[in-house]
Image: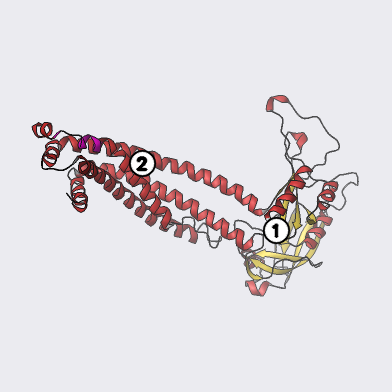
Amino acid sequence: MKTLDIIGTAVDNTFRSKLRTTLTVVAIFIGAFTLTLTSAIGTGVSNYLDIQLASVGTTDVLSISQTAEDAPDLGDGPLRYDPTRATADGVPSAEAGFSTGVLTDSDLDAIGNTSGIRDVNAVVSLTVSYIEYDAEGKFQVAISENAELTKADLAAGEQLTLSDNNQILLPASYLETLGLGAAEAAIGKVVTIGIANYDGAMHEVHATVTGVQNLTLLGAGVRLNQALTNELFAVQTDGEPTALERGYFLASAHFDPTSSEDQVAAIKADLASQGYTAQTLADQIGVFQTILTGIVAVLNGFGLIALLAAAFGIINTLLMSVQERTREIGLMKAMGMGGGRVYALFSVEAIFIGFLGSALGALAAIGAGSIISTVLANTVLADLQGLQVLQFAPGQVAGIILLVMVIAFLASTLPARRAARQNPIDALRYE
């Protein structure tokens, strides 16, 4: 029996017991469907993050914080009070049982004096009361505190600069509400920001709109340049007691954008030796991607469990097939068919079942995933331009199908070996 004959015979034999084969195929279908969907989610989100990092991520900024200390165990009681430690407004201090300290002005000076650091600014928390344009009404505003780490995905205008003039960059969703009109028309207009000082007195600060940004996962909210941030922070802290030592949860520091990876690593190591943790945007996204990979791996585990169950189904299906076709096997061997050919016949049957179930599962996942991704992109995730939650990479899909076929082949080993070792005389006598 030639190879093509073996394949044709194996395919025909697969459908001898339609119900048994169908149930096995369904189990494989579920596993392949799950694996294809979860892999597509991982690919879609990871690709979006990579694209965002490449297009809007800054490459010359470090986010710096105090290195976390070991927090006391719950049964150990509170830490001893240290009056020299500063606290940041709205940020729990180490004395409260949290392990993250805050940065003081002396810390900022130390960071600024570190070799390779060009400048450093504290990331301050601004409590802005409202934003207004041309007396069209006052509206609440969300300030982006990580504007230093990313460039805006601009719909119109330009990025913020280090100018001494107050500059603001607005999300596209703010324009209609504030009465600014279209994105291009909003550029150059002046908005008013209301902020209260320490005693509660309201002050107004003016800023020029230099750009309009699209919503992204890495950048949301209103962005302010350093000059505007400094003026708003000066107003917010006006009236504070002079004895109050202020602390900052984070600081952002610039380094030479042409620095090599080794040079950036040296800067991080230098800061680490001083008790600071420094991360680039790529480092922070890497942590998120690691978490995402773990979640996808757990979800893939459920698909693999279904495939494991399907593998036992294949074993059961082929063992019953061998028993039912004992005399047929004996006849083939009596006519000169070798044990290797018999082994190949049953192995091909298993591989075909695996291919059938995985191909159908992958196709169903691609169809359902494409619909789900389109619906999400046009509804819930409409503001996140370019985000396609599920992306089906051809190589990944082919890999899943191949994996299932390998599992099916391994599952066929026991029944195929039993068939190949049949004694033709005993097989022909089998009733």
Magenta stretch bounds: 415-423
Please identify the quarter of the rendering in which residue 100 is found.
top right
Residue ID for mark 2: 307
Residue 11 location in percent, x, y?
A: 21, 49
In the picture shown, does residue 168 fall above or below 323?
below
Residue 44 location in percent, x, y?
A: 50, 55
Three-letter residue code for mark 1: Ala
Residue ID for mark 1: 147
Between residue 430 and residue 95, name the one nearer to us. Answer: 430
> Is residue 78 in the magenta section?
no
Q: Residue at x 74, y 46 (%)?
A: 269
Between residue 414 and residue 308, name the one nearer to us. Answer: 414
In the picture shown, does residue 193 fall above or below 25?
below
> Is residue 416 in the magenta section?
yes
Residue 394 location in percent, x, y?
A: 41, 57
Under circle 2, the secondary element is helix
Residue 350 location in percent, x, y?
A: 27, 44
